[in-house]
């Protein structure tokens, strides 16, 4: 056959179109591409016991109260927690992750505390810490982690937050944007930001009613 020759191809010439199997792709994941079934991939692998009593009366309210605190893990870090009736002084405890010798205890009448420059200098950039708050013997904020971010990590978070917020302001957010931003928050141990995203994501995914509860456990 020469360069100017023509050929005709009919369905009968194509084996797969002549009685062969037809590939059927699965429906696109509502929370992003890559076969990710849910944001659980960004947290620890969950087991069935993590879901026990997830829908018990008051379970959600109790978690909302326990996780109502907020930490800004930039330098110097700051902490905020809800005002608790009957509590006049709060005890803030910050401790290093296993293998990191560090503790800080502060008593304050206010429901917030920000590190001084000297206190922040005692922290290790990029290291993991746990913070908690008690008052009158009751737990107000249970111990949960934060990452004392380095400058590049802080800059990366700001960039990702601005991108996410800009899409929100322009009404262009896709569900995959939530998982992308959740991944950033999970890597940087921004538990508070991640939980806020989980609340929104659970509302968009009614087939996973326990997604907020499960991710709370995972974080």
Image (cartoon, helix red, strand yellow):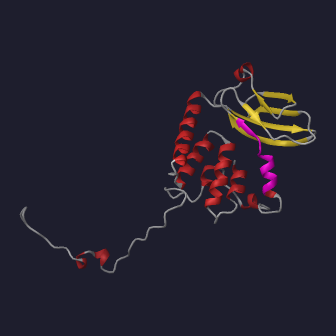
Q: Position of residue 66 (x, y in %)?
A: 80, 47
- Decide: is 8 above or below 129: below
* Magenta span of residues: 60-71
- Residue 186 pos. (x, y %): 62, 44
Asked whether, in this view, residue 203 is left or right of residue 29, the answer is: right
Picture coordinates of residue 93, whole percent (x, y): 82, 33
Q: Quadrant of the N terminus?
A: bottom left
Say which of 25 and 193 sits in front.
Answer: 193
Residue 118 falls in which quadrant of the image?
A: top right
> Does 121 sit above or below residue 14?
above
User: Which residue ends up furthest to the top in the rendered image?
Assistant: 118
Q: Front-most of 39 and 102?
A: 39
84 sits left or right of 127 in the view: right
Q: In the image, what residue occupies the spot 64% across and 27% down?
A: 125
Residue 196 among magenta residues: no
As drawn, the residue found furthest toward the front would be 170
- The residue sitting at 26% across, 74% down in the picture is 14
Which residue is pictured at 52% across the width and 51% down the height? 171
In this rendering, position of residue 89 left or right of residue 128: right
| 177, above or below 24, in the image | above
Where is 1 relative to 67, above or below? below
- The spot of residue 72 in percent (x, y) is 69, 34
**Mark count:** 0
In the rendered image, residue 65 lying in the magenta stretch gets the answer yes
């Amino acid at each position: 056959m020469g360069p100017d020759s023509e050929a005709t191809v009919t369905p009968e010439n194509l084996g797969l179109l002549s009685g062969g199997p037809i590939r059927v792709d699965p429906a696109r994941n509502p929370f992003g591409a890559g076969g990710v079934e849910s944001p659980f991939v960004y947290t620890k692998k969950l087991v069935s016991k993590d879901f026990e009593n997830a829908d018990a009366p008051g379970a959600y309210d109790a978690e909302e109260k326990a996780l109502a605190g907020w930490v800004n893990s930039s330098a110097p870090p700051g902490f905020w927690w809800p005002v608790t009736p009957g509590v006049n002084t709060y005890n803030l405890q910050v401790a290093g992750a296993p293998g990191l010798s560090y503790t800080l205890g502060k008593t304050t009448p206010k429901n917030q505390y920000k590190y001084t420059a000297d206190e922040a200098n005692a922290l290790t950039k990029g290291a993991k810490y746990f913070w908690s708050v008690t008052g009158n013997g009751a737990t107000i904020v249970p111990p949960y982690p934060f990452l004392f971010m380095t400058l590049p990590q802080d800059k990366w978070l700001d960039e990702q937050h601005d991108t996410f917020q800009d899409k929100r302001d322009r009404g262009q957010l896709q569900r995959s944007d939530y998982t992308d931003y959740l991944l950033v928050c999970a890597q940087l141990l921004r538990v508070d930001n991640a939980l806020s995203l989980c609340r929104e994501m659970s509302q968009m995914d009614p087939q996973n009613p326990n997604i907020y509860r499960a991710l709370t456990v995972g974080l």
